[in-house]
Amino acid sequence: MEYGIVLPKHIDADELIKFARAAEGLGFHSLWAADHIVLPVEETNLYPYTDDGRFTANSQDPQLDAFTLLSFIASQTNQINLGTSVAIVPYRNPIVQAKMFASLDVLTKGRVICGAGVGWWKEEFAALDAPFEKRGLATDEYLQIFKLLWTSDVTEFHGETYEFSNIAFFPKPVQKPEGIPIWIGGHTKRAVRRTVKYGNTWHPTRLRPDEIENMLPFIDQQCEEYGRKRDEITISLKRTLHFTDIGIETNSRIRSQAALIDSTHAVIEDIKRCEDLGIKNLTFDFQTNKTEECIKIMEHLMDT
């Protein structure tokens, strides 16, 4: 099992460096940056991963740009992989976005993962003048553009949401032959289909292991339909982790669904269940943003 950790919402550079270096030193597979550019002031009831639809952050929480944050963390680490969990693909011009991923991959010598999603917050789309109604189509076309630009010397693309021709795109990502691995976020069958068509890993968030199990036959069916070998598609599950028996208090903030907040024994049993289902990667965020508490949780996880 590989483990990834979501970077905390710090704006203190020294604390971020301490966190990242601790994760790398403990042998974690990857560090992840979330992607929100603005947060609407009015509270939502449409977030897919809480019982009442409220978002787990409030509008005053700091939201560093994911690509800038990962670039900074890359300069302070040497081996750990770096990914977006997930970049909301329709928010940015696809060519510029492909360039940002490729540049980071070159400068990190191939440590980048493109975590990609369609997004859900209509008001954030509106603020960014991004295509909310066609976000699924835009994501599919932008992912195709990424792969073309990362692998082809001369490229052209003619889609419903974007088109270009006769351009060169260099440097290419370090990772070969397909370029940067694409991990698709989302909990729906559309997300699974998008993974099989364009990606490498299904990266759902806030699901229970039994919900993953229920989706396995559909993954098999989609692989058969699109001519992918089943072992080409891996699964990474992202949830909140909190050990209740190591002396760190839980907080009263809104909890996402399927949060793994339990004793060490129960967490171990859950991880074993995930392994039995064929999940290859578990990515965790934490209830606490305090660096020392985060490091204590990471140390305890790697010792279990």
Image (tube, grey):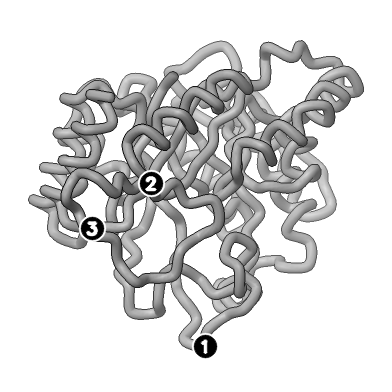
Q: At which x and y percent is residue 10?
A: 22, 59
- Placement of the N terminus among the 4 image quadrants: top left
Q: Which residue is mark 1?
A: 42
Q: Which residue shows up at 77% across the image and 30% down it? A: 197
Q: Which residue shows up at 32% across the image and 72% down it? A: 61
Front residue of 110 and 167: 110
Residue 67 visible in the picture: no
Q: At which x and y percent is residue 33?
A: 38, 48
Front residue of 177 and 202: 202
Residue 263 found in image quarter: top left
> What amino acid is labelled 1 in the image?
Glu
Residue 289 visible in the picture: yes
Front residue of 2 and 174: 2
> What amino acid is labelled 3 in the image?
Asn
* Viewer-side label of 2, 3: 2
Q: At which x and y percent is residue 216?
A: 76, 28
- Determine whether the residue tagged by mark 2 lies in a helix, strand or loop: strand
Q: Which residue is mark 2?
A: 262
2 or 3: tag closer to the N-terminus: 2
Mark 3 burial class by Cα count in 10 Å: few <14, some 14-19, many 20+: some
Q: CA distance from mark 3 to mark 1?
A: 24 Å
94 sits to left or right of 268: right
When the figure is inspected, residue 49 is found, relative to residue 71, above or below; the finding is: below
17 sits to left or right of 69: left
Q: At which x and y percent is residue 219?
A: 78, 27
When the figure is inspected, residue 161 is found, relative to residue 147, above or below; the finding is: below
Q: Which residue is mark 3?
A: 289
When the figure is inspected, residue 8 is found, relative to residue 215, above or below; the finding is: below
Mark 1 burial class by Cα count in 10 Å: few <14, some 14-19, many 20+: few
- Given contact means CB atoms under 8 Å apart, are the residues at marks 3 and 1 in contact? no
> What amino acid is labelled 2 in the image?
Asp
